[in-house]
Amino acid sequence: MPTTQPSHADDRTNVGRELPGPLVLCADDYAVHAPASAGILELARRQRLSATSVMVLSPRWAEDAAPLRELRDQIDVGLHLDFTSQMACDAGFGRSVGGMMWRSLWPLGQSLRQQWREAIEQQCDAFEHHWRHAPDHMDGHQHVQQFPGLRDLVLEVLQHRYGHGERRAWLRVSRVGQSDVKAAIITRWGAQLWARQLKAAGWRGLAPLRGAYDFTGGRDLYARRMRGWLSQARLDGGMIMCHPAKSVYPGDDIGDARAWEYEYLSSDVFAHDLSATGLQLVRGSALHLPS
């Protein structure tokens, strides 16, 4: 069975790979709706995940934080910074992901900088209020954390709020280690410069990222995709993102995909697939990440 006990990243370089290679498996979108939270909680309890990212703009976050706190010592819990969901739009600062990408092509005016920085601060406040702790990590819904313009503000807030502690959060660098158009777009929209900014400022970035797909194909195809991602991760570790939910939630555009992801990740088949690769699920906070 997989475990989330700490492992040393340097162990991956041992001749013959006699020791398990570390891998972070992160479930995005905790609290987006009840089935997502239920599925992520169940997978975490069964040690099928080593991290989750929270959508704190959801009205469920206050309620769903309590059972997640019971798993504080088992998985990393981070902020899934949101600027592109309907919840972000309802809050007055959100845009479509295409709109965010388009707006990031030229410098932000002072008014928009202030609005976006306040939105980041508010989401950090909401996370801390119910989690009762600083985030273990931070990433972004649809990878907004590394978009031009916004990433500068994210780093400013990180430095201001969390830059003085001994245990700094780790940051997702969405440099997608896959050969397809979606992966290329995600990577090219800021991954390289984001990684450089984090390194220069002394923050730990985790890459490569895998798990990007078009949310089609069903459980069997998802299982084949996961086997491919696991096989690739044997070479360079990093992390795999997933979006599981215990059941389909009405109105969720990727509801079917969430359900088949949960079915596979909770199955004995996934446990076997993970074991067969020689990978070990670990918390990003336990890795010796470069800074």
Image (tube, grey):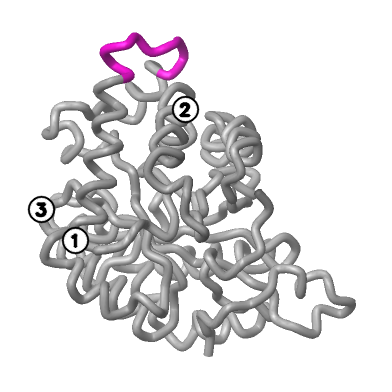
Neighbourhood count class around disc 1 (C-alpha, 10 Å): few under 14, some 14–19, many 20 upward: some
> With 164 as the anchor, is 124 left or right in this view?
left
**Label at residue 48:** none
Magenta span includes 110: yes
Amino acid type assigned to the residue bearing label 1 in the image: His
Magenta span includes 283: no
Label 1 sits on a secondary structure element that is helix
Viewer-proximal residue, 148 or 231? Answer: 148
Task: State yes or no: discs 1 and 3 in contact (Cβ < 8 Å).
Answer: no
Query: In whole angstroms, how far apart are the C-alphas of marks 2 and 1?
Result: 26 Å
Q: How many marks?
A: 3
Q: Position of residue 54 (x, y in %)?
A: 29, 56
Amino acid type assigned to the residue bearing label 2 in the image: Asp
Label 2 sits on a secondary structure element that is helix
**Label at residue 130:** 1
Marks 1 and 3, the one that precedes in the sequence: 3
Marks 3 and 2, the one that precedes in the sequence: 3
Q: Position of residue 101 (x, y in %)?
A: 41, 23
Label 3 sits on a secondary structure element that is loop
Q: Which residue is mark 3?
A: 59
Q: Residue at x 54, y 64 (%)?
A: 284
Task: State yes or no: discs 2 and 1 in contact (Cβ < 8 Å).
Answer: no
Q: Position of residue 78 (x, y in %)?
A: 37, 57
Q: 87 above or below 156? A: below
Q: Which residue is mark 2?
A: 152
Q: Residue at x 49, y 67 (%)?
A: 25
Marks 2 and 1, the one that precedes in the sequence: 1
Query: In whole angstroms, how far apart are the C-alphas of marks 3 and 2?
Result: 28 Å
Viewer-proximal residue, 99 or 225? Answer: 99
Q: Residue at x 60, y 62 (%)?
A: 229
